[in-house]
Image (cartoon, rainbow, N blue to C red):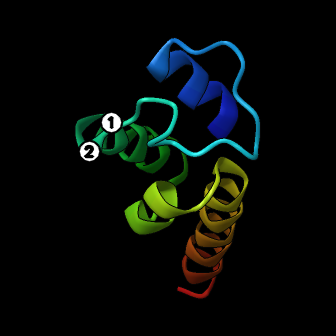
């Protein structure tokens, strides 16, 4: 999902897991939009420091772990 979302958001068709959000032209306002989309769909958001400092693959993996953690918290209630 992360790659597709970033591709659509930045209007950049050739996004790879090795790309960096900032290097592709992303900035803080677009990152907030991306985070809001993740929150709306999965109930978890991106860690903006990872999104800005690491590659998109790392950001996607971090989001997946946050979604799993949020699901585990929901199931434990």
Q: Nearer the viewer, residue 16 or 71?
A: 16
Quadrant location of residue 31?
top left
Q: Nearer the viewer, residue 74 or 5?
A: 5
Where is residue 43? Give x, y as percent: 47, 56
Q: Distance between the residues labelled 1 and 2?
A: 9 Å
The disc at residue 13 is none
Where is residue 71? Give x, y as percent: 63, 70
Q: Which residue is depicted at the point 49% across and 62% down?
A: 53
Q: Which residue is depicted at the point 67% across and 71% down?
A: 65
Q: Which residue is depicted at the point 72% across and 18% down?
A: 14
Contact between marks 1 and 2 (CB within 8 A): the answer is no
Quadrant location of residue 52?
bottom left
Where is residue 26? Give x, y as percent: 40, 35
Q: Which residue is depicted at the point 60% across and 87% down?
A: 76
The disc at residue 28 is 2
Q: Nearer the viewer, residue 36 or 43?
A: 36
Q: Is residue 1 above or below residue 70?
A: above
Residue 44 in sight: no
Is the N terminus in the top left, top right, bottom left or bottom right quadrant? top right
Residue 65 in sight: yes
Q: Residue furthest front?
A: 23
- Mark 2 lies on a secondary structure that is helix
Mark 2 crowd level (few <14, some 14–19, many ≥20, 10 Å Cα): few
Residue picked out by circle 1: 33
């Amino acid at each position: 999902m992360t790659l597709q979302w970033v591709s659509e958001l930045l209007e950049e068709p050739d996004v790879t897991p090795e790309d960096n959000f900032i290097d592709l032209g992303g900035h803080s306002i677009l990152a907030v939009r991306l985070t809001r989309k993740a929150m709306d769909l999965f109930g978890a958001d991106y860690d903006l420091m990872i999104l800005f400092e690491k590659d998109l693959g790392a950001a996607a993996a971090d989001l997946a772990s946050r979604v799993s953690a949020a699901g585990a918290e929901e199931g434990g209630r």
